[in-house]
Amino acid sequence: MTAPYVGQAARYEVTTPPPADGSTRARAGKLTLTHGVVETPQFMPVGTNATVKALSPDDIREVGASIILSNTYHLYLRPGHERIAQLGGLHRFMGWDGPILTDSGGFQVVSLGDLRVVDEDGVTFRSHIDGSLHRFTPEIAIGVQEALGSDVAVAFDQPVFPSSQRTVVTDATDRTHRWAERSLAAHSRPDQALFGIVQGGLEPDLRAESTRFIASLPFDGICIGGLAGDETPEQRDATLDVAIPLLADDPRPRYLMGLGSPADLLEAVHRGVDLFDSVLPARVARNGQLWVPGGRLNLRNQRFLDDPAPIQDDCPCIACRGFSRAYLAHLFRAKELLAYRLATCHNLTFTLDFMARIRAAIRAGTFPASISELRLRAGRVSGSEGVEKSA
Ligand SMILES: [Zn+2]
């Protein structure tokens, strides 16, 4: 069994390693950060603008979240990282005292920023809010995250769409490696962990090379970037099957960025991933799509207007405890604000409960035997159900 990873601001212990028979790479662990402990495998709800949309910090706790993600790019543009630092840092600013991971902004810069120009030193882009001109470099991205004071910062990278041409992937992956080293050199905050990002697209040799390179650097965790985009589930699985075995003896946590449907989470855990984030459960909730065991309910459907049952019988969330499908369906039709809060609480409760079931099965040694039952519970809800992925 691998000894725990002990860094300055992060400790990771694999408490249940994968079974020796090779039936799964799923493992359970405990990640200790400055603001608390995170049981893995774990899902991080996304608080883009220093808020998980429609939820209060009490709601975030109640749905079962132990760590959230916030977006460096968005907070840098509005209200500004220096303002947040002046006000006591991101935890105090948003009233959340649990762990926070900030992404590096790399994904948003290339997906949301207009007129972006990538050069060796960094990226120049226009704000999607007001068109103003900005520049991110590895040093700036780290500086912004240190000002925010997240528990985990992430190295600045250059993501590309999974389906990009090989020359594009090669160029971006090599640059990501140089930026990883610069991110490490720039990082100085002792109470903040720093994760590096593996790129390499869907090319097995580039993905392997990137995994080896990033793993050779003294990061506190390994992010697997450049997935949860336009690849098929089979391509994603194949890419994880290249990267994760190379990390088999690595004691650090593995984080697949941007994946969020229960079915996708399950398969990635099976392949050895520990951490996830996505806007998906909350975004589909705001569209009236409620996740239930085996599938989903579309509350905009006429038939729910007379349905007195809760969304899900055994669900402990605030929506299912107190309200009917009929009431929720009415709120959505009337565009009442409470609809968004109740629906988001339900989908995040479902997602985080699903992760808890996965952890329980791993710890009990029954994960391989339970996987078909877990697949049934996840239903056919997939990230590719026509929902945009940008955060
Ligand atoms: Zn519920």
Image (cartoon, rainbow, N blue to C red):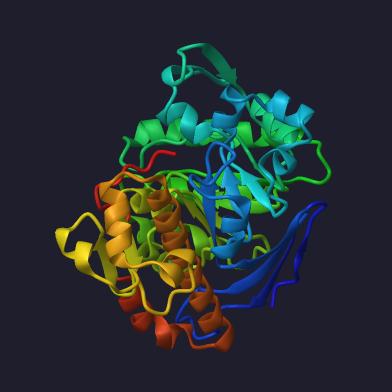
Looking at the picture, tell me which residue is in the foreground, 182 or 262: 262
Whether residue 94 is visible: yes
Horizontal arrangement in the rendering, residue 222 relative to residue 373 (left or right): right
Q: From the image, which quarter does the C terminus lie in?
A: top left
Tell me which residue sits at (57%, 57%) in the image: 59
Residue 153 rendering spot, x and y as whole percentages: 67, 42
**The image quarter in which residue 131 lies:** top left
Residue 389 in the image: x percent, y percent?
Answer: 37, 43
Q: Eyeballing the image, is 222 above or below 102? A: below
Q: Is residue 271 visible?
A: no
Question: For the view shown, which residue lies furthest in the top direction?
Answer: 132
User: Which x, y percent locates residue 214?
Assistant: 61, 46
Residue 83 lies in what quarter of the image?
top right
The count of marks equals 0
Residue 114: quarter of image: top left
183 left or right of 345 in image:
right
From the top left corner, tell me how far across and down residue 282 is, in percent. 42, 52
At x 44%, y 28%, the residue is 110
Q: Is residue 251 above or below residue 239?
A: below
Give 56 or 139, whichever is nearer the viewer. Answer: 56
- Viewer-proximal residue among 87 and 389: 87
Q: Residue at (70%, 48%) from the top-left corner?
A: 219
Q: Residue at x 55, y 76 (%)?
A: 359
Q: Using the image, determine if residue 208 lies above or below residue 365.
A: above
Quarter of the image with the N terminus in it = bottom right
Q: Ligand 1 is in which quadrant of the figure? A: bottom left
Task: Using the image as rendered, state which of residue 322 and residue 170 is in the foreground.
Answer: 322
